Structures are given as structure tokens and as C-alpha cells.
Amino acid sequence: MVLFDKFKAGLQKTHQKLAHEIKRIVTGSPKFTSRLIEELEAALLGADLGMPMTLKIIDAVKKAYETQGISGLDVFEIASKIVVDSLKNNKAELVINNNGLTVVSIVGVNGTGKTTTAAKLAYMLQENNLKVLLAACDTFRAAGIEQIKTWGNRLNVPVISSAHGADPAAVAHDAITAALSKNADYLIIDTAGRLHTKHNLMQELQKIHRVMSKKLPGAPHETLLVLDATTGTNALNQAKEFHKAVNLTGLVITKLDGTSKGGMVVAIQQELNLPIKFIGLGEKPDDLQPFDPEQFAEAMFSEKA
């Protein structure tokens, strides 16, 4: 499946709802009325594009109407262009430590898909002929350790782990030691899910990062927050709190294929000015894809999508 087809399939629910609403609103009114504007605004907000982005699109639609009238008004094209322009500075490339090992810390609340994301990222890097190790730093859940080991076996990626209940910072320390000894290109740290409101758990995450930095200066080189798209813009509060605690370098948005609120990707990126590195569009190892603003916008707004 080509990349656009993945975006198209993953954003199908968002696209179908948004396209249906926009067509209904524009074709149902012969004039550009305040009622039309209100309904269009509601449709865009319903896709969780957020108020700032919604207002940008509405403003652009108004200007287009003033020059070409309602008959030539292409709301889909206007919205797509605004989204792409707003995301044009998004840097999706994963950081590379040119001096050796690159450490990527995967963080987030419970249930967002961190372990699966860590495994899929390992798969992607391995497919690019890079040597990768995984670290099972979710030591609170015995099932979490087993889950990443299962992924490691499936993908033939070594997993550094310890016993259930072990100090996750110690596991991270040992994982860096192992990755350095094996001359690995990337080490991906799968951390435990933690509520962003739990101060002690956020402090523990900070400790893991401090231990890694002492063992390997500059580590972690990437700290990626995994957000569940089905929570919509409510994920924004999670992102803000994690960013305060550990200085996020990017976002991974999962479960986009299960929501009609795909616009949350745009809203959160605009609010935090953090790059969206990857989006999850399904369950298969290759369903984690680098974020592409043009293809994302086309999959959301194209009448042909």
C-alpha cells in the first residue's frame, strides 16, 4: 500500500464526517450567510481542528467568497492549503546522534499504544538497515515486559529487560551499556504509562532521563510523547504536562484510524509547536508512518480521498 493510501485509509472516519458536513453546508445555501459560517465552524471544530485553525480556515473562506462568490467556492481546497501552510515547518525526521548511539524515549499515559509504537519504530529503523535495541522500562506491568519481548521476537530485535518491579532507571542504564557494546544505531526506551497528573510518577520519569544522560551525555536524544487520537484535543493537557517534565522533542499520534477527530493532530501541533514525528494508522508493523503534512491534509479534505 502506497503512503497516501495509508493516510487515506487511516483518516477515513475523519474525512467522511467532515466531507459530508462541508458538502451539506455549502450546497444547502445559495448565499454566504452567517448561518453558513456558523455551521462550517461547527463542522471544523467537530473534527477537533481547534479554534485557532478553524478561524484561519473560516477567514480564508470569507476572503475567497468576496472575490469569486459561492459558486466558485472550494472549501476543501482552501482548508487543505491552510493546514499544509500551518504545518510546513513540521520536522518529522528522527534525530540521529552522529557521534554514535541515538536513544529514543517513548513516553505517555496508559493505553496510548507506547509499547506498540516502540516496536513499530524499531521495525521502521531496522527496515532502513539500522541496528536497533529495545529496552523494557515498563517494569510495573509484567504483561508490559512480555508484550515488548513478544514484539522483539516477532521483529528479531533484541530486548533488554529485567524482572517485574525492577528499577526502570537501572534497566535504562543497562540498556545503554548493552547498546553501546553492540554498536547499535538506536536504542528505543519503552517507559511505563503514567498519568500526567501524578507528580511522583513524572518525577520517576525525570530520574530515568537523568540516569540515561549520565551514562550517555545527550541521551535521550529524542523524547516522543504518544497520544491517542480518539481522545481528541483533550490530549493537549497531557502534552503540556509531559513537556514541562521532560522536554518533549516530538509527538506520535496513534489510533487515527479509529476516530473522526483527526484534526486534533493539527490543533495540538499548533498549540505546542512540537513536531509530529509519526502517526499510527493501523495495527501492522508498517502502519507507523512519518508525518507528511501534504498527504495528511489531502486525506482529510480532498473530495477524491
Image (cartoon, rainbow, N blue to C red):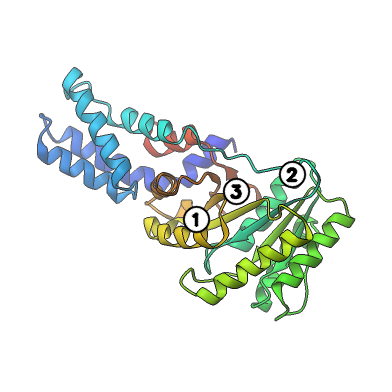
Tag 3–tag 2 contact (CB < 8 Å): no
The residue located at (23%, 23%) in the rendering is 64
Amino acid under label 1?
Lys
Spot the residue most to the right. 181
Please state which of residues 149 and 169 is positioned toward the viewer in this rendering: 169
The residue located at (47%, 51%) in the rendering is 256
Residue 298 locus on image (x, y percent): 43, 33
User: Which quadrant of the rendered structure holds the C terminus?
Assistant: top left
Amino acid under label 3?
Asp
In this rendering, the label closer to the viewer, 1 or 2: 2
- Circle 2 sits in a helix, a strand or a loop, which is it? loop
| Residue hosting label 3 | 287
Residue 75 locus on image (x, y percent): 27, 31
| Residue hosting label 1 | 255
- Circle 1 sits in a helix, a strand or a loop, which is it? loop
- C-alpha separation, residue under disc 1 versus residue under disc 2: 29 Å
The residue located at (37%, 42%) in the rendering is 15
Q: In the rendered structure, which disc, 3 or 2, sits on the residue that comes first in sequence?
A: 2
Residue 152 locus on image (x, y percent): 76, 61
Tell me: 186 left or right of 301: right
Tag 3–tag 1 contact (CB < 8 Å): no
Q: Which mark is residue 97?
A: 2
- C-alpha separation, residue under disc 3 versus residue under disc 2: 25 Å
- Whether residue 303 is visible to the viewer of this picture, yes or no, is no
Q: In the rendered structure, which disc, 3 or 1, sits on the residue that comes first in sequence?
A: 1
- C-alpha separation, residue under disc 3 versus residue under disc 1: 10 Å
Q: Please tell me whether residue 101 is drawn above or below residue 54 in the rendered image.
A: below
